[in-house]
């Protein structure tokens, strides 16, 4: 179970972009929540009326959980190239989800049929990496795409490839997430 402080940090980071009276005291947070100092990889997902509104994250931990979360919250709200920047009028209709990713591990497989048997629906997040192309789906994507075959096909397209790429045996990584979600207006700001 993730600490609700993660949602509070994400919300406050977003609010700071509108009004700099919303601030985060990093040192106090590190003192009160030492786990925030550890390296961590996060995704921040924003939904508006149950439709994707922004989603940005890190696949590999490369900075503190705190720094990763703040950067990804701001990026999901204002810099996701698929959407216009978030505005304050949307607050009553959005929800915020923070996902903390496990370290990705290579998923060994013989061929596409074998890969289909090794993918765990509703549990696995996957990364496809092939010849400079990369794409990932969080485990939450299983809510929209139920079958492993469709999940993998859509993942290849997201990576800028075609489903035929699996004939070339691309590298597949598996990871898991812990996630916490709440309506934006129900999250306390810091």
Image (cartoon, rainbow, N blue to C red):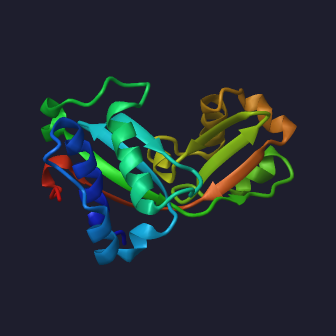
- Indicate left or right for 189 with 74 as reference: left
Image quarter in which the N terminus is found: bottom left
Question: Which of the 4 quarters of the picture holds residue 51?
Answer: top left
Asked whether residue 178 is in view, the answer is no
- Indicate left or right for 59 with 141 as reference: right
Residue, x 79% and y 38% (percent of image)?
166
Query: x, y percentage for residue 78?
Result: 33, 32
Residue, x 25% and y 61% (percent of image)?
25
Residue, x 31% and y 62% (percent of image)?
26
Image quarter in which the C terminus is found: bottom left
Observer-nearest of 28 and 161: 28
Residue, x 17% and y 43% (percent of image)?
20
Observer-nearest of 91 and 24: 24
Observer-nearest of 147 and 69: 69
Query: x, y percentage for residue 91?
Result: 16, 39
Asked whether residue 102 is in view, the answer is yes
Q: Which residue lies furthest to the front in this view?
A: 27
Question: Which of the 4 quarters of the picture holds residue 24?
Answer: bottom left
Query: x, y percentage for residue 4?
Result: 27, 66
Q: How many dots with numbers?
A: 0
Query: x, y percentage for residue 141?
Result: 48, 45
The image shows residue 80, relative to residue 56, as above or below, that is above
- Indicate left or right for 116 with 30 as reference: right
């Amino acid at each position: 179970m993730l600490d609700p402080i993660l949602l509070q940090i994400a919300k406050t980071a977003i609010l700071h972009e509108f009004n700099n009276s919303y601030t985060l005291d990093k040192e106090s947070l590190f003192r009160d929540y030492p786990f925030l100092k550890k390296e961590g990889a996060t995704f921040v997902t924003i939904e508006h009326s149950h439709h994707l509104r922004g989603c940005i994250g890190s696949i590999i931990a490369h900075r503190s959980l705190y720094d990763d979360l703040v950067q990804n919250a701001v990026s999901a709200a204002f810099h996701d190239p698929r959407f216009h920047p978030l505005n304050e009028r949307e607050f009553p209709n959005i929800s915020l989800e923070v996902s903390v990713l496990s370290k990705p591990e290579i998923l060994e497989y013989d061929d596409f049929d074998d890969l289909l048997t090794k993918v765990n629906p509703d549990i696995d997040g996957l990364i496809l990496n092939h010849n400079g192309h990369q794409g990932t789906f969080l485990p939450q994507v299983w809510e929209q795409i139920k079958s492993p075959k469709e999940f993998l096909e859509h993942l290849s397209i997201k990576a800028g490839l075609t489903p035929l790429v699996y004939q070339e045996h691309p590298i597949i990584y598996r990871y898991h997430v812990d996630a916490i979600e709440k309506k934006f207006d129900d999250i306390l700001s810091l």
